[in-house]
Each structure stands twice: as structure tokens, then as C-alpha cells.
Image: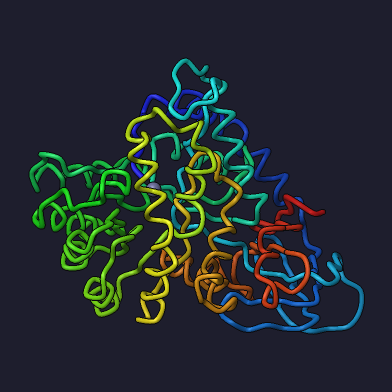
Amino acid sequence: MKTPFTASLAISGLAMLAFGITVFAQGGAQAGRGRNGAPITIRAAHVFDGKGGVIQNGVVEVQGSKIIAVDKREGPVTYDLGDATLLPGMIDVHVHLNWYFSSNGKYGGRGDTADYQTQAVLDNARKTLMAGFTTVQSLGAASDKPLRDAIAAGVVVGPRILTSISQIQGGTLTPDQLRERVRQAKAQGADVIKFFASGSIRDGGKMNVTQAQVDAVCGEAKAVGLRSLVHAHDPASIMASVKAGCTQIEHGLFADDASITAMKDANVYFDPNIGLVLQNYLWNKDHYLGSGNFNDEGFAAMERALPNLPVVFKKALDAGVRMPMGTDAVAGAHGENAREIIARVHAGQSTTGALIGATSLAAESLGLGTTIGTLAPGFEADIVAVPGDAIADITNVHRTTFVMKGGRIYKKN
Ligand SMILES: [Zn+2]
């Protein structure tokens, strides 16, 4: 969703944090590598590899930051997690870590101190990791960059972050100006480009740019080696994005059969957000009401859209569209990301398919399919555990009990 308030960016505090990284990085990194030599072994009743394979009573062996073995074996282990399911660290391909409720309880409230803003964003990052999401793609805000870098340096606790740093709006910008925006984002260190080709669900979601504008953004993104993710609700904006060669469509709540077929034929990724974002706005209506287009009409539009969410998802699923799991998590939703996986199963996807969408397929969509999202030798040791058999009961993914990221344990209940 569009960010109406740039004033709520927690840039200043996080920039100061990033400034301190150089000082802390050496000590932090060395402490991280304190896992010197001895491998860590983790056993659980079920080990889901991220690609569809399950080992009963499996063991994952970790050395340093990497997985070195996944197998069945006898004998003692470092951590025996009993009747749990081990999964690759989960991945959410669409979040907004900079969204939080202000000190007056409102979204987009004014007057928050820099410290309040910084703590709110850090809290979002910590909650996301503790929920078992070891990698997220934030789409995106300037505050993501120092946060990304501080987490990568081990200075603060949070998921691995890829970010668009900014969100590009078409408006009256010419194709040349849009190409320049893309190059600027690349120069600022963006991992991905985020563009809006339609309005929000609260505004009706109609295409609000020209084909030439979409072509410029997605074409230039490709030229500078970045993926392009496009916010597109209606069939016209989806078709334009597919035609422009964009990498991934976000939302697509009004996708029809033709636009679903177009996404499938072009092998474009589709990230419909069906289980968290609109529900979260409605649960937190009091916090959002009065900010931007969060008015009575906007809330009515979101209520009307709810029944269509599982329908669009199921159509795309049946058509064979690749759908990495993204939530569009905003204020109030951070740490609730797994609800999206559960919603996909309720909408008709297999538990295995839904888990693949949040692990190996999500990693592939980020261009990280050979480093994260799979439990196999050589992959990053991003490993989470949830209670019981997650394949039999998907709701277990919302009760993460163990979180390891890059070989370091952040949570162990
Ligand atoms: Zn969004």
C-alpha cells in the first residue's frame, strides 16, 4: 500500500544507528563468529526442506552461518526440538517496516520524537524475526537502508532486508524522468524497484499511469540489474505491467481471467495479499481512521474487497501463476506475517504449496534461490521451528518457537 506520510519515517535515529555501525561492526561480527568450530545439530520430528520434501525425525547440522547437512541420524544432538517442524526461515516479499502507530495512537500522527520513531521501527523488525521471518522485502522507505545495514552488521535484531528505499509514483513524470528515478534508487543502494501503476483499494484501484511510464520504470530497472515490483489492482494496470516486462505484480485484487492468464504466460510473479493487510486495517480501524484515504469510504471499499481475496488467489493458483508469499504488512501487522500462509491454505492451496510460497519460491523471487529458503547443505542457516506437524496443521506456523538466522539463535522457547 501507498505510504501517505513520509513525515513518519524514522530516518534520523536509524541514520545515527547506521553511523555507529562502523564502530560496532567488528566487535559484533566477531561475537557472531564465536560459534567457532563445533557444529550445531538440531533434531525435530518433521523437517520440511522448503521445496516439498519432508524428513521424519530429521537432523539439520549447522557450521558457522551455513547448513552443512540435512539427514536422519542417531545419537545426541545440540537441540532436540521434539515434536516440532523445522522449516527454512520464512520469507515475506512485501512489508513496510517503517509503518507504526504514533505516540498518540494514530497512524501517521505528528510529533513523535526521533527516539520513538527509531524504537518503533526496530520493534517492527524484531517482531518480524521472532515470528520466524528471517528475510523480508520492504517496499520501501528511506529508513529501510540504515535498518538493513544495521541488521546485516549484527548491530540490531531483525530479518535480512531487501528494500526499494523509495516508492516511485508515475504522476506527471515523463518516461525520461522515471528512468532517472530508477537510476537514483539504484545509486542509493536499492535492492529492487517499487512502482505504482494503479490507485489503492480505497481509491478503487484503477490504472493511473500510462503504458509508456510503466515501460520506462520496468525497462530501466532491468537495464540497471534490478527487479521491478508493481502495485497493480485492476486488469489494465496488471496487463500494462506484464507487457512492460516487470518482474512481479503486487495485490491484483481485481485481476480477471485475462490478466491472470497474461501473468502465467509471461511467467511473472504475482503476490496477492489476501490474509493480513486489509484485515489488519479493519482490526485497527480506530488507529488508521482520519489518515489520508483511510476514511469511511475507504474502509467500506476494503470491507467489500474482502470476499474477493480468496477467489482471486484460487483462480491464479489454478492457472499455475507463481505466487511468492507477501503480506504487505503495515502498522499493527508486523509479526503477524504467518497469517498470510494460513489464509492461502484456507483459500485452497495445499499446506506444502503454501510453505513453498513462503520459503524456496519466495527466495527464488528475490533472486536468492540458491542461498536462502531451503534446508540443504550450502544454504544459509536460516532455520525456524513451529510446534507439532505444520504440514498436518498449517496454523502452527503462527506459533514459532525457535529462530536461527545465519547460524545465530535469536529465539528458543
Ligand atoms: Zn505495500
Asked if residue 364 is positioned above or below residue 1 in the image, the reply reads: below
Give residue 21's quadrant in the image: top right
* Closer-to-camera residue (121/106): 106
In percent of the image, x 72 and y 83: which residue is there? Answer: 55
Taking the view exactly as shown, the residue that stands out farthest to the right is 76
> Residue at (72%, 50%) from the top-left corner?
410
Nearer to us in this view, 84 or 106: 106
Residue 122 is left or right of residue 368, and the answer is right
* Residue located at (42% from left, 74% from top): 314
From the viewer's perspective, is residue 175 above or below residue 156? below
**What is the x, y in percent for residue 261?**
26, 78
Query: What is the number of callouts on the image?
Result: 0
**Image position of 220 with respect to 333: above or below:** below
Q: Which x, y percent locates residue 11?
A: 44, 28
Whole-percent x, y for residue 403 in the image: 71, 56
Identify the image quadrant of residue 386.
bottom right
Picture quarter with the C terminus: bottom right
Q: How is the image coloured?
A: rainbow
8 vs 257, left or right, is right
Residue drawn at (41%, 77%) of the image:
317
Residue 133, horizontal then vertical, whole percent: 60, 56
